[in-house]
Amino acid sequence: MGCFILLILMMFHFACLSSHSCHPYENSALLHFKTQLITNTTFYENTYYEHLCPNLYPKMRTWDNGTDCCSWMGVTCHSVSSHVIGLDLSCSALVGNIHPNSTLFYLTHLQTLSLACNYIYGSELPSQFGGFVSLTHLNLSYCAFKGDIPSQISHLSKLQSLDLSWNYALSLKETTWKRLLQNTTSLREVVLDETDMSSIGPTPGPLSLIANLSSTLVTLSLVHTKISGYLTSDIFCLPNLQKLNLGANQGIQVHVPKLNCNTSLLSILDLSECNFHGPIPSSFFNLTYLTSLILVDSFLNGSIPSSLSNLHHLVYLVLSRNNLSGKIPNVFDRLTNLQTLSLHDNNFQGKLPSSLFTLTRLSQLDCSSNQIEGPLSDKVAFSNLTELFLEGNLLNGTIPSSIFSLKSLRTFDLSKNQFIGPISGEITSYSLEYLDLCNNKLQGNFPETIFHLVNLSHLCLSSNKWSGTTHFSLFSKLQNLEYLSLSGCSLLLLESETSVNYTFFNLQALQLFSNNIIGYSKFSGNFPQLKYLELSNNKLEGKVPKWIHDIHSLIHLKLSHNMFTSIGHQFPWYQFEYLDLSFNLMDDDISSFFCNATFLNVINLSHNRFIGTFPQCLANSSSLRNLDLQMNKFHGTLPDTFEDLVTLNLNGNQFKGLLPKSLANCTDLMDLNLGNNQFEDTFPNWLQNLLNFEILVLQGNQLYGSIVKLKSENIFPSLIIFDISSNNFSGSLPKAYIQNFQAMKIQSSLYYYLQSDSGSGEGNIELEYDNSMTTTVKGVSITLTKIPNAFANIDLSSNNFEGEIPDVFGELQALKSINLSHNNLIGPIPHVMGNLTNLESLDLSSNMLTGNIPAELTNLIFLEVLNLSSNHLEGSIPQGKQFDTFSNNSYKGNIGLNVPLQQYSSSQAEDKFGFGWKPVAIGYAFGMVLGIGLGFCGFSVGKPQWLVIIFRVFMHIQL
Ligand SMILES: *[C@@H]1O[C@H](CO)[C@@H](O)[C@H](O)[C@H]1NC(C)=O
Ligand SMILES: *[C@@H]1O[C@H](CO)[C@@H](O)[C@H](O)[C@H]1NC(C)=O
Ligand SMILES: *[C@@H]1O[C@H](CO)[C@@H](O)[C@H](O)[C@H]1NC(C)=O
Ligand SMILES: *[C@@H]1O[C@H](CO)[C@@H](O)[C@H](O)[C@H]1NC(C)=O
């Protein structure tokens, strides 16, 4: 903006002053200066400068030797002396650096200088800038200068405006700051955003220095300058200060219990992302000249007092992302100038105040992600409203028809609320470009009046209870549509007919999962731009139809949870990045698939009937990161040319032979599941140095030998799931590994829970995909948060391990489950097992353990599964806490144990915990959480059901 105004000023001067001819030495200095920089407009294309400089112009190209320099663009000469007094090269597409010997510094008469928004890279700010002693305005913003601001800047005693903001890495020393403030007695504007001022100590602090010295200051902007210290009333009371922006300074503490002046002229106040705890100070509501109050992301709590009504000049009120609560005060009839009100991501409750709906000038209203309830008012005067965001609240009732007739509305989001009923009446907000009504309880016939909103580019109607029938082809009337989501509307019949040929010219993403789609295989639509297509969970059957094969722009395809029987040999693999065909009935031989697929990053073919060998073309793919082939009928050996995999899941096939050593080259490998195949090899200790490796499952193969330790400092440092059960491993338990499982020693304070959205009926399931952690299990919505070590687990069961259980197990504090059953272990149960206070399942059954059951095990207060059966334990069973809940099955087959007579059923044990087994198991695939423990799965003593689920079946849980 600054650049813009200056440019206009300069052009004005150019018109008035061109009659004077320029001094030859200044002419020559400017021409030399021109040779030191390059004008390169292509350099600025597609960069953020395009946004900064809508008026980008190569001004220096008008500078020709032989013409009068006073006539050049950007140059201003004095009307009498003809000296160059103004140079505005802002947004001139310059690239280069400025040396201390630059002829720019010959222009000693300069009063205004702007080089803003040019890429003056790599230069330190030359001290020669301090030689422009006549300068009143200096703007070097967005120039990529770096280093210390030279102390000579304080020589510019006539400065009124100094803007050094948004350079690459400028810093300002305390002495320079002090001298500058002392010497510049008429400073009106100081903008130093992104300048490192951290060397200025907190006492008296950079702000107090200003308060004491700068009575002339009108604008002060110190965004992200690392300043610290107290912000006090003194600053607000500076006699001329109108604009104060101190955002993104965590070191600033706000302490303004009251204003120490009668009036403050402050009109713009931005203290976002400061260390601003507690309620909004009541003194702020005496800043009656405020037009903008911006306090985003500032830890504020408490409610907004009704004294907000004092601020009747307010145009812009932004208090989003705090912990503000209570009701929004009903004072907006006094704030008639308001154009933007943003309160999103707080805890506001109650209804939206009625006065809010009377604001005729309001252009943007964002109250999303609060707990606002009640129906919306039907009396709305929002004649200028362009954006309305109310998503993620508890709003209910029907959507008032008056809102759907707002003529200026372009963006409207009511998703994730409790709105009911049909959309009554005509929707006449023809300006709408973005409409999101997803995740409500809207019902009735599908609102066909939507097809008149021809400007729509984003339309989400998913997860409602629409009924009746609609013809998919109607959506092609919306020719600007880029995103369409119509998922989870199982009561709605979505018909596609072959008779009409329709085209979705701009559609890029189409989500139609969990629907009733009729005639999908006969789609005759054209989708020339479609990149993302999701048709999961639709009971679609037969071959993947030709119309999908024909979408040549497609890069992301999700067809999971259908009854497709074949993908077909003509499938255009080469174009895809993401492909999910899981949970179908496909039985193609994929051995020769995926050739020429140079972008494929994620492939999920799990839970099908695919046959053949490992596809050779995937073995050599350099783009592939995540591959899930589990639960199919693949056979043969694996190639050994893996490069960059992050997850590989081949569980439940008939692969055989050696484990591929090239996996050790996959430095980002996190999750490897080769379980339930026929691999025959020794333990892959060559994987132990991978830093991010979290999950290793080799269960159910024919692996053998003892687990030998390699000489290494780091052994599986990130591993949290280690399952090598049901193999032929022998020798002693791998003590050296166990004591190095660093990640299993760190107990996470966070936890996974199943949040069952029990009230939700059919058609109202959460259907967020990909980046979200929400998924659906048999109609129950579940939200997950990723916490890697919340489910640490070791399973060495059903091998031939011998010897004693090492004490090092006692260090793995994060462990939730240990299974050492069905081995040949001898000796006692280590007392240190009692340290594993997070343990939920402990199975040591079918060994030859001796001695007493350590009383310390009663410390394991989360233990729900204990199996010590079929050993040689003796003595009595510890009493109290969890031990009162285990049934006798936990101990049977130990001749020497005195088992008491009481018998506890496992269901009693579950009740005791209320939540039962809902704390969640995890499995990773595609870098995300996939597996979920199911509390309602029923649970018998022995191997917990969730482990079976994670590693064998993954149930119907896929993200
Ligand atoms: C400008 O032109 C004059 C005369 O042709 C020449 O002497 C001088 O060196 C030129 N200056 C520059 C900077 O090119
Ligand atoms: C101009 O910038 C473009 C893009 O950065 C670069 O490719 C080109 O070489 C530059 N031209 C000159 C003359 O430096
Ligand atoms: C200015 O200094 C730079 C680097 O020190 C040098 O390359 C350049 O020739 C000098 N220019 C003039 C005009 O002296
Ligand atoms: C103050 O400004 C004057 C005039 O430019 C200059 O001579 C003097 O060195 C400056 N003082 C400081 C402390 O920078």
Image (tube, grey):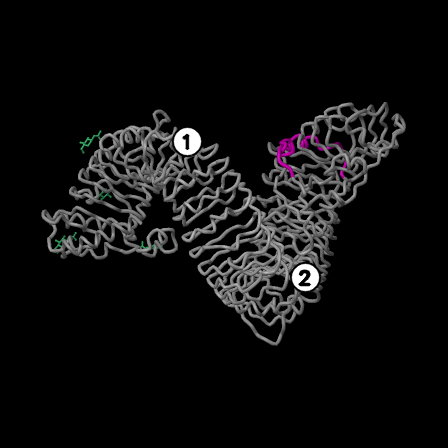
Comparing 344 with 47, the one in front is 344
x then y, percent, for residue 931: 68, 46
Does residue 853 appear left or right of residue 614 in this picture? right
Q: For mark 2, what is the residue? A: 491
The answer to if 343 sits in the magenta stretch is: no
Does residue 832 appear left or right of residue 63 in this picture? right
Cα separation between marks 2 and 1: 54 Å
Q: Residue at x 67, y 28 (%)?
A: 811
Q: Verify CB contact (< 8 Å) between mark 2 and mark 1.
A: no
SS type, badge 2? loop
Comparing 431 with 460, the one in front is 431
How many residues crowd mark 2 within 10 Å: few (<14), some (14–19), many (20+)?
Answer: some
Kind of residue at disc 1: Val
| On screen, residue 795 above or below 52 | above
Q: For mark 1, what is the residue? A: 254
Tell me the quadrant of ligand 3. Answer: top left
| On screen, residue 846 above or below 602 | above
Which of the two labelled residues, at mark 2 and mark 1, occupies the earlier sequence position? 1
SS type, badge 1? strand
x then y, percent, for residue 576: 57, 60
Residue numbers of the magenta segment: 729-751
